[in-house]
Image (spheres, grey):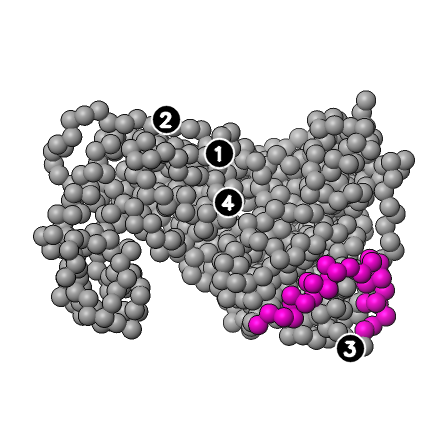
Amino acid sequence: MAMIIIDGQEIEAEAGSMIIQAADKADIYIPRFCYHEKLSIAANCRMCLVEVEKAPKPLPACATPITDGMVIHTVSEQAVEAQQGTMEFLLINHPLDCPICDQGGECPLQDQALGYGGDVSRFSEGKRVVDDPDIGPLIETEMTRCIHCTRCVRFGQEVAGIMELGAIGRGEDMKIATVVGRTVDSEVSGNVIDLCPVGALTSKPYRFSARAWELASHDAISPHDCLGSNLNIQTAHDTVKRVLPRTNGHVNECWLSDRDRFSYEGVNSPDRLLQPLVRVGDRFEEVAWEVALQRAATALSDIGKAQGPGAIGALASPTATLEEFFLLQQLMRGLGSDNVDHRLRQRDFRDDSFTALFPGTELPIEQIQDAACVLLVGCHLRKELPLVALRVREMCRLGGQVAALNPMDYEQNFPLTEALVVAPSALPAALARIAMARVGQVEVSEELRQWAELIPDSEDFARTAKMLSDVEGEVVVVLGQIAAQHREASALRAIASWLAQHTGIRLAFLPEANGAAAWIAGCVPHRQANGDGVQEPGLNVSQMLSARLSAYLLFGLEPTMDLAATGNLVSALSDASFVLSFSAFRSAVPAQADVVFPLAPFTESAGTYVNCDGRAQSVEAAMDPRGMARPGWKILRVLGNYLALPGFDYITVDDVRSRVNLSLPEVVCRLEEGCPLPGAASKSVPWSVESQRFERVVDVPIYDVDPIVRRASSLQRTRDHSLATVHMNKEQLLALNVKAGDSVRVVADADEVRLTITPDDRVLGGCVYIPMGSAATAPLGGADYIALKVIR
């Protein structure tokens, strides 16, 4: 530590840290543009010049290390004169367009020009003008305003790991540009909007829609993934205008993914459902809430009496709040049915009775960058949890190692020590090989050995196991959404749990969206709230669709896109006597619905989200619901009253929340000891030109995860959205005598779609990559095998 004096104030600071860092800790203001605490030091704006005694000239506070006894003046005549001179140079070429600039009112340059700028310019020459390139649907450019701080460039290089922007030219001719023909729309690109200290890079969807002083700010939590990023929703005139990050070092730090930043466009969609609907003949009619509630209550009550409560089932979107999950399961169990589930894309439920209280991460998110090693299994982390991927990238920068076991060679934004790519059906076998090699000489069950024998041993597995054992520090095995939605997901969880029990490795079973809250609230068929058991487990989502129930409650989901078994759902709903849909969007209502309740989205509803760390975060509504839409917890509470069910006398959302114990224990997501490992599946039939039967790699693209994101128009115009094609490697294209852009019929069971071909060498031979979650691929659901028929 070193003792220094800043503006007469004696401060103890870490030796070697920069003057600006010590000043910030002491709440002493030093102006700056290029400096940012999360980025490397560039020292190219020179706005932070300060006077240091015994130094011959002013020094940049961001790049001057402190030494013991240093005396610094930030507001002396010399320091202020240097800062004013810097400001004059910065304003030489800056346009005077504050009245039309979206940054106006919250612009650091505007603020500091007031404090350090002159009232009259001495510059009489012509100002430079820079062209404004179109860099995609998310970011608007006004590059004449750029002051060359390079924050955006450093963010891409150092934090995001994707260099989308760079500096070209020198001196006055320097400008920030992209690679020719490329757009700036990676999963975290919107952070450059927050970093830009002027109006050079602004939000394109927000452009010219409001002024900063008109906006009201509201705390919120993102519902789109299991991280629970902290948001600041800004509204004006009863409309969400933009979303900004709210700093939380435990969760999202100061960053925000583009999915969380721009998904608000879906909330403002013209497709919003604003009035209750009931079916009259072959069409829907708008009715009052009382009519819709009474009709739904009567139908559910009649079916329960005539066919028993087991004939009723409820499916909930994993993006719902804890309070909505709790009330939905309370309503179902009040009717006498345990048929309630939120795991819409999961297909394997064999280990339900051995699962922990909720899935999550045994190593807290904030500690991931300090880990020594991470093994990703069935996980495209960069797209599933973009901000966690940034922490893993930081871990690699600090010397950590990452291995990935995936069904496709996904592009990550961090270096991989080992990249193992196997066919989807071989994921459990490959993990078994790694686990056996890592644990070494212990007694191995016959089931585990059978799984391992489904794939030939290789040096890749041995190297990965050695990496897991040789490092010093925390090791984490992460099972992502591809693993969770795998048809042998219980085998993957069992093998990972066996590995953890024998080695002390930490596990992370990533839930979908607010899935952790759903488990805790009892929105699963085999448990009530707080992990309490049930006498007889109800039906899970797959069983509900196969059982052809008489009544279905669909809460917040889009049936054709949010389930793995889409085809089964369509026929199940068609056979049902009554379908009740809670939906925020008109086009998300299934054609078979009998009553439709307009559901308020997350911006218009209070509630609680529990992230994968087990961190419960409660927020209030950012704005009043539009039209006659209402928060889900209120609808469920009143529906319970109409059904005359006991315990539905809640007044506030806090009353509902109090029924759930949120004093959660430390996350332990591994399966309980004694959980049997499912028997090994049979080997898949090798692909041949004659059979044209392929194993399908399936996941949900980042901007197709839920109904709100799918209606965010700007996100739907990014590169990540253009995935609804048949991806296969070039060797298979030659074998099939097809080329890029050719049309093929894709057949899965009795369902068929028509798609085009895209060459993609990330895909293994014998496999094709066809994502789900979009209208184009919805009929295929989560089918593991498909047949291709070329259209000549």
Q: Nearer the viewer, mark 2 or mark 1?
A: 1
Q: Which residue position holds label 4?
A: 162
Indicate the position of residue 512 as horizontal and vertical percent values.
61, 54
Q: Which mark is residue 442?
A: 3
Q: Please check the rendered image and state whether residue 456 is part of the magenta-colored stretch, yes or no.
A: yes
- Label 1 secondary element: loop
Q: Which residue is mark 2?
A: 131
What crowding class fits label 3: few (fewer than 14 Cα within 10 Å), some (14-19), or many (20 or more)?
few
In the rendered view, tell whether residue 733 sits above or below residue 351. above
Any part of residue 47 in sight: yes
Q: Give the quarter of the figure containing the C terminus.
A: top right
Which of the marked residues, 4 or 3, is nearer the chain's N terminus?
4
Q: Nearer the viewer, residue 196 or 216?
A: 196
Above/below status of 290 relative to 132 = below
Give the residue displayed 14% in from the left and 32% down from the top: 121
Answer with left or right where residue 765 lies relative to residue 194: right
Question: Is residue 178 left or right of 142 when viewed as pictured?
Answer: right
Disc nearer the start of the sequence (4/1)? 4
Which residues, given as a range, are shown in magenta?
A: 444-472
Q: Quadrant of the N terminus?
A: bottom left
Question: What distance separates the C-alpha of mark 4 from that of mark 3?
Answer: 43 Å
Q: Give the CA separation, mark 2 to mark 1.
A: 15 Å
Residue in view at x 45 percent, y 34 percent? 178
Picture quadrant where residue 790 is located: top right
- Asked if residue 744 lies in the magenta stretch, the reply is no
Location of residue 281 in the rendering, given as x and y in whole percent from the top left corner = 70, 31
Answer with mark 2 or mark 1, whichever residue precedes in sequence.
Answer: 2
Q: Main secondary structure of the magenta part?
A: helix
Whole-angstrom CA distance, mark 3 to mark 2, is: 66 Å
Point out which mark residue 179 bears: 1
